[in-house]
């Protein structure tokens, strides 16, 4: 498999992880503002979260673009790695590890967001719609 493509995908997954960490930090600050009953700060921070979320989506689009430039076999293998399948070769290992880190960070971000959303929205929360 093309090592350059693996490195590019790994770099993009790392950027996604960093954006998630940024979103998690803003979400944590929102929870702190909510604890203080500071509705103005909650609103400001909610607005601040929009930009890194958009950037996260742009990074995902870049990953999809990168995938379209791969040969069919490489694209199939990279898609498997991006879904979380284990590495089959040593050269795939860094991407597989980065995907794992991203998934763990994403799970944590979702849990944090769910907790905050339920506190803010109660029965009207996005997460209550799927119970």
Image (cartoon, rainbow, N blue to C red):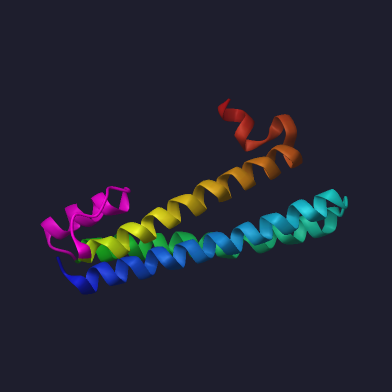
Q: Residue furthest right?
A: 37
Indicate left or right for 46 with 2 as reference: right
On the image, which quarter does residue 23 sit in?
bottom right
- Asked whether 74 falls inside the magenta stretch, the response is yes
The residue under the point 33% across, 62% down is 63
Indicate left or right for 54 with 13 as reference: right
Residue 119 vs 100, above or below: the answer is above
The residue under the point 25% across, 67% down is 6
Residue 98 vs 113, above or below: the answer is below
The magenta segment: 70-90
Indicate the position of residue 49 as horizontal and vertical percent values.
63, 60
Q: Quadrant of the C terminus?
A: top right
Q: Residue furthest front?
A: 90
The residue under the point 44% across, 56% down is 102
Q: Residue furthest bottom?
A: 4
29 or 96: nearer the viewer: 96
């Amino acid at each position: 498999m093309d090592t350059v493509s693996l490195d590019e995908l790994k770099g993009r997954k790392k950027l996604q992880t960093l954006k998630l960490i940024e979103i998690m930090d803003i979400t944590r600050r929102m929870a702190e503002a909510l604890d203080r009953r500071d509705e103005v700060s909650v609103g400001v921070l909610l607005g601040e979260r929009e930009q890194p979320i958009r950037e996260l989506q742009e990074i995902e689009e870049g990953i999809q673009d990168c995938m379209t430039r791969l040969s069919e076999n490489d694209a199939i293998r990279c898609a498997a790695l991006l879904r979380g399948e284990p590495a089959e070769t040593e050269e795939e290992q860094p991407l597989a590890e980065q995907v794992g880190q991203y998934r763990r960070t994403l799970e944590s971000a979702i849990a944090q967001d769910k907790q905050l959303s339920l506190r803010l929205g109660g029965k009207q929360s996005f997460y209550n719609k799927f119970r």
